[in-house]
Image (cartoon, grey):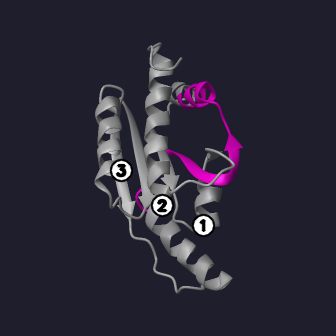
Amino acid sequence: MLSVTLACVGKLKEDYWRAACAEYAKRLSPFCKLRIVEVDEERLPDNPSDAQITAALETEGHRLLSQIPAGASLIALCIEGKGMTSPALSEQMMRWTVEGVSHIAFVIGSSCGLSQLVKQSARLQLSMSAMTFPHQLARVMVLEQVYRAMQIAAGGKYHK
């Protein structure tokens, strides 16, 4: 069975975000072994310098990468990444499994983004949109898209 890790900077604070993630985790259980990992966000001053932001991103990046199993295909969620349709994401994920990949990891950074180290370590840099979303919503969106990808691959009726 495919393993999927969703590694995120920060915690979900509101019950409705946790409930939405739990719903998709439940829906994904027949398709994959899902693991959601939260790493601490670095604290920054109110008006951080570029150097302070870069240092924080590097620290967060090392925390994120430490949670990714060796050999996993890493997908970094970043605005400069490649845009894909849901069927294209499903096809990519299934292509990797045919190539022998047994673990796919999605990484969501903090409000300041992702470190260059994480982006360079990624097999795919993926953009969900040119628009900006709260990171809590992005987490739900990624889980929904993984579920949709699994449904598409299985020939389910969820994707219309």
| 21 on left or right of 145 | left
Residue 97 lies, with reference to residue 154, above or below; the image says: below
Precedes in sequence: disc 1 or disc 3: 3
Check if residue 70 falls in the magenta segment. yes
Locate residue 42, reporting x and y percent. Answer: 46, 77
Residue 27 lies, with reference to residue 158, above or below; the image says: below
Residue at 45% of width from left, 14% of height from top?
Answer: 157
Residue 30 lies, with reference to residue 76, above or below; the image says: above
Q: Which residues are magenta?
A: 66-93
Query: What label does residue 115 carry, if any?
Result: 1
The secondary element bearing badge 1 is classed as loop
Q: Is residue 80 visible?
A: yes
Precedes in sequence: disc 3 or disc 2: 3
**Looking at the image, is mark 1 or mark 2 nearer the viewer?**
1
Residue at 58% of width from left, 60% of height from top?
Answer: 118
Give the residue type at disc 2. Leu
Residue 129 in which image quadrant? top right
> Label 2: how many residues lie within 10 Å, few (<14), some (14-19) or many (20+)?
some
